[in-house]
Image (cartoon, grey):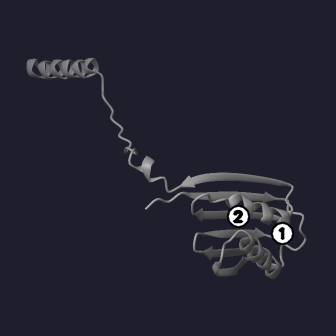
């Protein structure tokens, strides 16, 4: 099985959208965005985690999206994982950024599921080798100490 997955993480800072606490509107916007990009949702759930903090998770056949929404901080952490050929998580991210209207974003893209390089992964082995001279000097010192004890 060949799997070319892409995992995009996005931090949205200082979001301008005053509706960060309108979870139903956020869910509808997410559903529309995913539908436009060919994702058929299997499940979408949202939980209030704390005061002003909601966690939203959407799952579909080829991936998932998660949002951690901090209304008071005007911050959203978004993860988009797509596991299909030519996956474009940036397109979904762009639609969600248009909704939240952040001043600043930070994105990280990870390529996942590359089994060809997994065969080349070697375990890290750490070996410590003491210099022989140091061991020889230590041995000589032990012999001198033992000889002194025998002479006394």
Q: Quadrant of the C terminus?
A: top left
Q: Residue at x 12, y 19 (%)?
A: 147
Q: Quadrant of residue 48?
A: bottom right
Residue, far left: 150
Which residue is denoted by mark 1 in the rendering?
72
Q: Residue at x 69, y 74 (%)?
A: 55
Secondary structure category for the residue under label 2:
strand
Q: Nearer the viewer, residue 10 or 130?
A: 10
Nearest to N terminus: mark 1 or mark 2: 1
Q: Residue at x 48, y 52 (%)?
A: 114
Question: How many numbered discs, if any?
Answer: 2
Q: Residue 150 vs residue 134: left or right?
A: left
Q: Quadrant of the N terminus?
A: bottom left
Q: Position of residue 9 (x, y in %)?
A: 67, 58
Label 1: few (<14), some (14–19) or many (≥20) C-alpha neighbours in 10 Å:
few
Which residue is denoted by mark 2 in the rendering?
78
Q: Residue 141 vs residue 147: left or right?
A: right
Q: Position of residue 99 (x, y in %)?
A: 84, 67
In this view of the protein, can residue 51 be seen by the observer?
A: no
Q: Is residue 50 above or below residue 106?
A: below
In this view of the protein, can residue 81 be seen by the observer?
A: yes
Q: Is residue 76 above or below residue 60?
A: above
Q: Nearer the viewer, residue 21 or 86?
A: 86
Secondary structure category for the residue under label 1:
loop
Q: Position of residue 97 (x, y in %)?
A: 81, 62
């Amino acid at each position: 099985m060949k799997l070319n997955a892409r995992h995009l993480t996005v931090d949205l800072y200082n979001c301008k959208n005053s509706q960060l606490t309108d979870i139903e509107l956020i869910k509808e916007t997410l559903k529309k965005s995913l539908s436009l990009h060919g994702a058929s949702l299997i499940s979408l759930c949202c939980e209030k985690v704390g005061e002003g903090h909601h966690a939203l998770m959407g799952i579909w056949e080829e991936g998932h999206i998660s949002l951690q929404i901090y209304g008071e901080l005007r911050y959203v952490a978004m993860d988009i994982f797509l596991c299909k050929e030519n996956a474009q998580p940036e397109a979904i991210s762009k639609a969600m950024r248009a909704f939240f209207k952040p001043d600043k974003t930070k994105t990280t893209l990870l390529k996942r599921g590359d089994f060809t390089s997994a065969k080349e992964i070697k375990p890290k082995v750490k070996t410590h080798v003491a210099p022989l001279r140091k061991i020889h000097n230590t041995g000589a010192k032990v012999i001198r100490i033992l000889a002194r004890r025998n002479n006394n």
